[in-house]
Image (cartoon, helix red, strand yellow):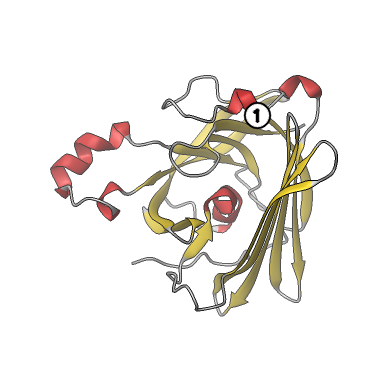
Amino acid sequence: MHRRISPPSFEVASERSYRLSPRGRKSFHTVLEAGDMLDPSSGRRSRVRISRSHGDLGLCFEHPIKAGSIREQLQLKVEGNALRCDHLERSVINDAGRRVRYEEIVFGDTTVPLPAAVYPEVALPFLLSWQPFDGRTRDLYAWINDRFVARVEYQTRGETTLQLASGPRRAIAMLMYPDLNDWVRLGKVLTRLARPLVPKYRIWFSPTAPFEVLRFEGPYGPPGAPEVVMELDG
């Protein structure tokens, strides 16, 4: 059953910076390479701000790219013990300060019927930090655009030691991957054989509340998107 993400029961309001760089070992060839977009040597950092107002939640991302920046703002509504996507704005700003891309999505509007448990794929690493770390496999829908909504599964893989630039950290590891059966009915045997070939999203969280994201590795978007590494700065 596709369950909505539960809201956090602890304080999450924060602002963090992350090093953003191309993934060293890519899983797949991609048309748009992360190295063509990112310049880690610039010293610029991604900023992630989480806010809470009247119980509802907001996530704001600003990512530096070689020729400008990407800004994303997501608003979520708390409904009972679940979070519903309400509104997303995404902009690409060039070096001259001009907005060259813009999207606005009102998830609460039913003109385009979407699954209840649907969330923008780029926000999932941070939203999943509020879910139980019990090793169970769960699923939901990752929204890429209205014409591309993919079912994904995720599960934690226990505690490990993560090597960051700032030193070793205890971490909870999570694996997320698209469910191929959402597109083609493969059956259990073929699904098991194909799983090693499926693009994987790897996330590590701090093991205590607020379980902040320490590191993310994978496509920034759907399979085929530029593969990146986001690592907590400091």
Q: Closest to the observer: 209 or 164?
A: 164
Picture quarter containing residue 20?
top right
Q: Closest to the observer: 52 or 159?
A: 52
Amino acid at circle 1:
Met
Image position, residue 221 (x, y; %): 52, 44
Position of the C terminus by quadrant: top right
Q: In the image, is 191 to the left or to the right of 54? A: left
Q: Closest to the observer: 83 or 207?
A: 83
- For the point 55% across and 25% down, the residue is 23
With respect to residue 224, does 2 lie above or below? Answer: below
Tally of numbered tags: 1
Picture quarter containing residue 169?
top right
- For the point 42% across and 37% down, the residue is 200
With respect to residue 166, does 45 lie above or below? Answer: below
Picture quarter containing residue 8?
bottom right
Element at label 1? helix
Q: Is residue 163 visible?
A: no
The residue carrying pointer 1 sits among few (fewer than 14), some (14 to 19) or many (20 or more) residues within 10 Å by Cα, namely: some
Image position, residue 115 (x, y; %): 42, 69
Q: Is residue 175 visible?
A: yes
With respect to residue 12, does 194 lie above or below? Answer: above
Q: In the image, is 113 to the left or to the right of 187? A: right
Position of the N terminus by quadrant: bottom left
Q: Which residue is mark 1?
A: 37
- For the point 60% across and 34% down, the residue is 170
- Extreme-right residue of the structure: 96
Q: In the image, is 107 to the left or to the right of 27? A: right
- For the point 48% across and 64% down, the residue is 118
With respect to residue 172, does 23 lie above or below? Answer: above
